[in-house]
Amino acid sequence: MTTQDSQPGSGLVLPRYRRDDVDAHPPLLSPGYKSTVARAPRHPLVHLPQRLTEVTGPLLGEGRLGALDHDLTRQHDGEPQGQRIIVHGRVRDGDGRPVPHTLVEIWQANAAGRYRDARDTWPAPLDPHFEGVGRALTDDQGRYRFITVQPGAYPWRNHDNAWRPAHIHFSLFGRAFTQRLVTQMYFPGDPLFFQDPIFNSVRDPKARERMIARYDHASTAPEWALAYEFDIVLRGRESTPFEDGDDDE
Amino acid sequence: MSEQLGVMPAQTVGPYLHIGLRWPDGPYVVPEGTPGAFWISGRIVDGTGTPVVDAMVESWQADPDGRFDHPDDPRGARPPALVGFRGFGRSETDGQGWYRLLTVKPGALPEPDGGTEAPHLTLSVFGRGLLHRLVTRLYFPDESTANAADPVLSNVDTDRRGTLLASPAADGFRFDIHLQGDHETVFFAL
């Protein structure tokens, strides 16, 4: 038996998040990225109306953060090798509203392009002073800030002489299950973009541009660190909360 | 109306998601020892039947009373009566493609039109080779009456509905996720 606690004719009015444009995200099947071939579902996705479970979500953070989680250069006794960089930005929704107090998780390769993961075995050096993992909460204006080192590019065998452009993985919760997003931040002017099927899986060039951080001289720390700005937009809400009956496909 | 901003595109978590997203307490939607807690475990397999060893499952659910401690629940945010209930779980797959989550059964949920959603978990699947998360739902096999009235399940082709149903297991329930193939799990567009 269930713990049935249904509210008859509930009259619940739920927020509704706008559905993303078709070209906003990469198609799941992107054969240039070979791993998608056996992993992308073949059936079309089924329409899921946004209900209570989807318009709510975990609001986690505070208790999960250590004092140095946002500073990847101070997590060990010594400093990591590489160019120090500040990576900062704002998390907003599609209507420009800040997303406050939301957990941002990042991970990345070290300056030589190697991850601290037993599965990453290419012959570039590990750095005993670099974990490559960071966490931060956005402030009440949706701002976050990390200090890290510039990650290196690395080879990955997807195609002949394949190299991933330097990138930092970003994971965001937003305020609702609908807003959950994992993406990658790239660096401006990277010469490896042309051959990278993951970056290019996003078909709309304007959408692709959003994944490239902006070099931000005004935010550098003189004689200490360069800076990049990376603003992240999560899904926005419909302006009018409709009663029911999404009927798109 | 203000101008809408373009959303950030999704990208894969890649093969090294474990270093960034592993939480020691990830699988514990409720703390070990919670009365009535059970394990949900399952295997993620790809279209060739190969276990997916570099993936991660996240779960989100109502508490046993069918409530969320969240400001957008129009009934009001309500802290769970169950001590330590987080509602959220995260489990990477192991070397054989298994994930596991310790949780309790969520309550049924009211629908805007007066219907009722059967107890369910909403799941996200991330992994190498997945350029965007996959979204699915898990329903319970011992809720056949509630499941029959569930509006989301009813909207799924009858021959595929079973992929959203967990099966009983010794320590709780089993829920395998087939990314592709004859038993491809139903995935949703949100």
Image (tube, grey):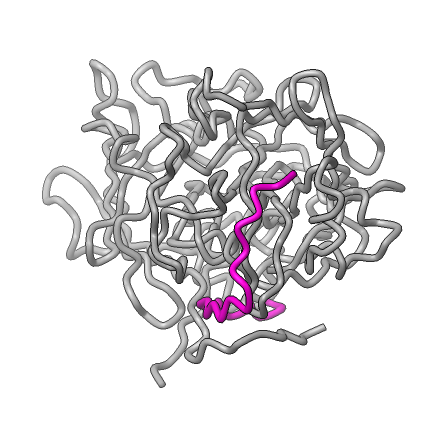
Image position, residue A230 (x, y; %) = 33, 54
The residue that appears at 55% across and 55% down in the rendered structure is A6
State which region is magenta. A1-23
Tag count: 0
Q: Quadrant of residue A27?
A: bottom right
Of A191 and A134, nearer the camera is A134
Residue A203 lies, with reference to residue B98, above or below; the image says below
The residue that appears at 20% across and 50% down in the rendered structure is A139
Q: Is residue A20 magenta?
A: yes
Image position, residue A88 (x, y; %) = 26, 49
Residue A15 lies, with reference to residue B37, above or below; the image says below
The residue that appears at 50% across and 32% down in the rendered structure is B90
Q: Quadrant of the N terminus of chain B?
A: bottom left
Secondary structure character of the magenta stretch overall = loop
Q: Is residue A218 visible?
A: yes
Q: Is residue A114 visible?
A: no
